[in-house]
Amino acid sequence: MASDLFGAAREDRLAERAPLAARLRPRSLDEVVGQEHLLGKGRPLRVLIETDRLSSVILWGPPGTGKTTIARLIAGETAKAFEPLSAVSAGVKDVREVVARARARLGEHGQGTILFLDEVHRFNKTQQDALLPHVEEGLLVLVGATTENPYFSLTSPLLSRSTLFRLEPLQPAHVRELLERAHDDAERGLGPDALPVDDDALAHLVDRSEGDARHALTSLEVAYRLAIEAERDRVTLADAEAALALRALRYGDDEHYDVLSAFIKSVRGSDPDAGLYWLARMVEAGEDPRLIARRLVILASEDIGMADPMALVVADAAARAVEFVGMPEAQLNLAQAVIHLALAPKSNSVITGLSSAFEDVREQPAGSVPVHLRDASYPGAGKLGHGKGYVYPHDAPTSWVPQEYRPAEVAGNVYYRPGSEGAEVGLAERLERRRARVESERDE
């Protein structure tokens, strides 16, 4: 009895000291915020959990999106025994012990076992192979949680025996709902006398959480404590900034887009110094680097295009570095891309050419595919005349022949008009010669 009392007291103290994100974990599927595509009414994962028909699954998503929360809810819903392990600290020996308990449980009580393996990507191939037979025979139902791409981090046999559910970063509205719930929930949140939170402070916490509920709640708790220590009667933007160690964006939505617009126009205008200034201003303000990278990738085709075909490669490499390396180091990759794109020759021929093609597609009659271009690979196509007259370009000395590739309704319409800078100078000369030959063939 005494040990039970001490144990209960210990659990109560641990619960009181637990981080806000842990105290505020949903106690039912209806309390889960976000992931409606998986947990909404009638959605697949919810149905499997509520009917206790769950087979092995992998929960893949960024930090703070609810993987562990879902696992805990499964533990509360299932009639099976629930065995949690962390792949960070567990090994083959721990798996064997779980397997032994699962066999005894199944033999003595007919009860199945769910193994929740957090950070499952930390298991190496040998450890995964040791787990595989027990998942394969159905002794264990595996619920694995991972932030890494499972196609790279899990073995094919283990992945093929599991259903993959992908969790998405929470939307800003979801994060705001969680923060407001933490403030209002006296039992599990900041307490009955929780300080008011200024709107700009709350907005900063939401914006900078990047869809990570745990990060947002932890930051709110820190901001709350900072406000109390400073003897303030409310949580201010300064508290939120200090909690995140990140300066808030000092402009509203309109000016936010103005700064982004100034950045793009500076690079388009071939001014690397201005491009670097606006980049530094956005990074310092905590702008999402993925947004910056996306805009550079678009600019590489919209404003440079074939004048420097490597521009898209450089911009794409910077975007990949943002995902692979992360900030703050990836700001160097972004800066390199800004300088390259700013100094590259400029051409808008890609976007104007595509716009012209769209105009024809939308306004001109949809002509039939010319017979010589039709699929001739299937039996009977030859009898229909498909492919007749087609000339294979690689049979020609220059790997090019003057044949028509468009319906008659739009033949001869020019969409791509090369610019006069960079690589497009040579492309323009080559294209003009070829277009002239096609035109002469058409006139004949």
Image: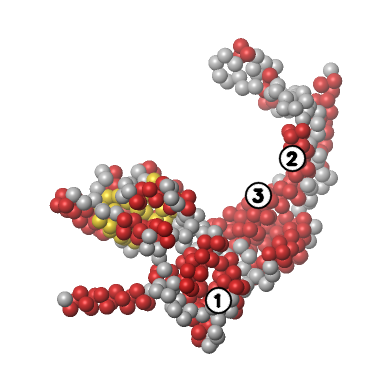
Q: What's the residue at 58%, 54% (across, down)? A: 320
Cα separation, mark 1 vs mark 2, equals: 49 Å
Q: Residue at x 51, y 65 (%)?
A: 177
Instruction: Residue 237: name its quadrant.
Output: bottom right
User: What residue sits right under mark 1 in the picture?
Assistant: 197
Q: Residue furthest left?
A: 108
As helix, strand or loop, the secondary structure at mark 3 comes to helix
Give the quarter of the image for residue 146: bottom left
Residue extending farthest to the top is: 383
State which quadrant residue 285 falls in.
Answer: bottom right
Query: For the C terminus, which image quadrant?
Result: top right
The quarter of the image holding the N terminus is bottom left
Residue furthest to the bottom in view is: 231
Please tell me the numbered disc located at residue 313. 3
**Which residue is painted at 35% across and 58% down in the image?**
73
> Disc 2 on helix, strand or loop?
helix
Does residue 123 appear to the left or right of 314 in the view shown? left
Q: Position of residue 298 (x, y in %)?
A: 69, 51
Q: Nearer the viewer, residue 393 or 283?
A: 283
Instruction: Confirm or deny contact between disc 1 and disc 2 (CB under 8 A).
Output: no
Q: Are marks 3 and 2 in contact (CB under 8 Å)?
A: no
Disc 3 + disc 1, Cβ < 8 Å: no
Tell me which amino acid carries mark 2.
Answer: Leu
Residue highlighted by disc 2 = 354
Q: Give the residue type that dot 1 points to.
A: Val
